[in-house]
Image: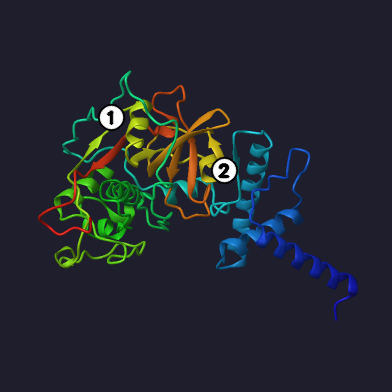
Amino acid sequence: MLKPKSAMLILLLAMVIASFATAMDMSVVSYDDNHHVTADEASLIFESWMIKHGKVYDSVAEKERRFTIFKDNLRFITNRNAANLSYRLGLNRFADISQDEYVQLCHGTNARPPRNHFFMTRSDRYKTSASDVLPKSVDWRNEGAVTEVKDQGLCRSCWAFSTVGAVEGLNKVVTGELITLSEQDLINCNKENNGCEGGKIETAYEFIINNGGLGTNNDYPYKAVNGVCDGHFKENNKNVILDGYENLPANDESSLMKAVAHQPVTAIIDSSSREFQLYESGVFDGTCKTNLNHGVVVVGYGTENGRDYWIVKNSRGNTWGEAGYMKMARNIANPRGLCGIAMRASYPLKNSFDTGKSSIA
């Protein structure tokens, strides 16, 4: 039989875990340099974090290994947040993996265009001029041109999600209808790319243009694994069709801004930093290189407390960042943009309602 003191400790532990599990904010923002997290505190936080994210480990040894990584990330978060930066880090879904594991898990876009690829001439469509008058802020979510945040899972398919996100947005801009399209269609059928082993956005656009358009997620739901292409799929289903795609001038945030004022845009960035991994909120201007490895969609821009930012849609579910989004610093000194966001951006083209082959539009 438990002693009263032991029973009270167990009850207290259960109450603390329950309170952490139901809390909306797991960012440990109350900690600072003078508040060192004890082993007991870290254990409670870890247990509540596991409940929140549905984490279950195969063995006690694996749980201990993950707890060790978690504590290290917790210390990193606490120290960075104590610096009162323009952004906050938090215990998101990646808090139990190391930076090396995160890099291996999360990056699936090749920074180079395909070999022997006819790289489309960079268009002057969105080249800026002195006469341009652009909105001070744009958010395509407010215009109903952005589908809900998706989760690519353990499949390295960011190349497909970023391509699809830009096509979904353009289809809404041109037709007035927002349709959730299929990343799995690209993963299974775009043989020029490597499915869950990574791919190239240019090749994805060309597949959509040359192979009868892109199917809907309802008809071709996401499985997060490589699959067999259904050869009769496009013959029996309506598809969203593109007329082409173009690349923005490299290293030109002004052109990127003009493009985003007209439509959501695909960008390839370097998301491999530990700060990017653990980002929670605010205008991110942290450590970032330009080794392009991750496809995202730029769905707007704005200014917060005097700091310009891009609105970047990720494909890691709504428990990463600001409900799946990042505010990434805009107009920085480096012409490549933070994390290389201005280095290799592109956008699809759709002139009008499709004719000939049937289209959802």
Label 1 to label 2: alpha-carbon separation:
30 Å
Instruction: Give the position of the N terminus as an image quadrant.
Output: bottom right
What amino acid is found at the position of numbered circle 2 in the picture? Ser
Q: Disc 1 marks which residue?
A: 126
Percent position of residue 193, x then y: 25, 50
Say left or right for 74 vs 316. right
Q: Disc 2 marks which residue?
A: 281
Seen in the picture, residue 117 relative to 333 is either above or below; the reply is below
Instruction: Give the position of the C terminus as an image quadrant.
Output: bottom left
Seen in the picture, residue 225 relative to 341 is either above or below; the reply is below
Q: Secondary structure at mark 2?
A: strand
Query: Residue at the location (26% across, 59% down)?
Result: 185
What amino acid is found at the position of numbered circle 1 in the picture? Tyr
Percent position of residue 88, x then y: 60, 41
Query: Where is residue 281, by image quadrant?
Result: top right
Looking at this view, is 272 or 256 the one in front? 256
- How many marks do you count on the picture? 2
Query: Where is residue 342, by image quadrant?
Result: top left
**Whether residue 348 can be seen here:** yes
Give yes or no for contact between labels 1 and 2 (Cβ–Cβ under 8 Å). no
